[in-house]
Structures are given as structure tokens and as C-alpha cells.
Amino acid sequence: MGRRRRKRMRRQVRTVPQVYKRYFTCPRCGSLTLSITLTQAKDEEGNVKAGVKRAVAVCGNCGLRCEMEVPEGLEKVDVYNLVSDAYFEGRGCGEVGGEEEEASGEAPGEEV
Ligand SMILES: [Zn+2]
């Protein structure tokens, strides 16, 4: 009996969440330490806003923090462009720790 061994084609396809963070050049200090996180945007009542993401850019070097809502589906690069625009126009950017952090019990954001 020629029993054929079935080749186990079980490839370990691990769905590793992208831990890798991409850093961008900080518009303020110029270091490549600006990280951008996209999270679900919510309105004041906590309802998820459709088609909108909340982008938070934080510089690990100088502490710049920009926060804004961006259209869903944007690449981080596009978000970065919006962030740097916002910074230069003085919108939505501040210091880390300057304001009270809102308690976020939500998922820590999707890496896109
Ligand atoms: Zn910086």
C-alpha cells in the first residue's frame, strides 16, 4: 500500500500586526522621530465617525504633538503632509503633556 504522505503545506502564515512604526521628519525639530498613529475618530458622544480617522502625530524628540481628523484611507505619508501643513499653519499642534490626556480605553490604533 503506497500510502502517500500528504505534504503538509501548512505554512505558518502569521498575521503579525505591524509593529513597525514609520517615522517621519518632525516639522519642528527636523528629526526623524515623528510617529503617526491613526485611530477611529469619534464625536463627542462617542459615536464612531464614518469615513474619518483621528490622526495623532507625536515627535519623540521635541515633544510636538499634532492631532486632527483626516479622511479615512489616507496613507500615513498623506497624513504626514497634513500634519506638517497644520504645524506650519499653527493648527492642531501643541506640546506633549501640555493638555490633559483623554483616557483612551480603546484600541491603540491601527497601523496602516
Ligand atoms: Zn520634533
Image (spheres, helix red, strand yellow):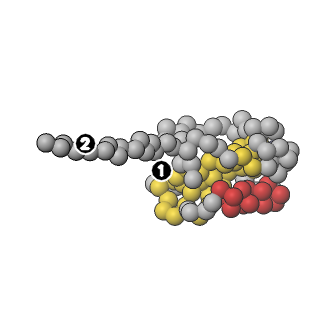
Q: Position of residue 91 (x, y in %)?
A: 76, 56
Q: Amino acid at mark 2?
A: Arg
| Residue carrying label 2 | 5
Decide which of 26, 70 is in the foreground and name it.
Answer: 26
The answer to whether 65 appears left or right of 50 in the picture is: right
Nearest the eye: 97 or 8: 8
Whether tag 2 and tag 1 are in contact, CB under 8 A, the answer is no
Label 1 belongs to which residue? 46
Q: Residue at x 55, y 37 (%)?
A: 103
Q: Is residue 75 visible?
A: yes
Q: Position of residue 2 (x, y in %)?
A: 18, 43
Rate crowding at label 2 as few (under 14), some (14 to 19) or many (20 or more) other CA atoms within 10 Å. few
Q: Residue furthest front?
A: 1
How many numbered marks does the figure carry?
2
Q: Nearer the viewer, mark 2 or mark 1?
A: 2
Q: What residue sits 52% from the left and 64% below the top?
A: 51
Q: Quadrant of the N terminus?
A: top left
Q: Is residue 44 visible?
A: no
CA neighbours of label 1 inside 10 A, class few (<14), some (14 to 19), many (20+): few
Q: Is residue 102 above or below residue 52?
A: above
Residue type highlighted by circle 1: Gly
Residue in the picture at 70% in, 39% down: 99
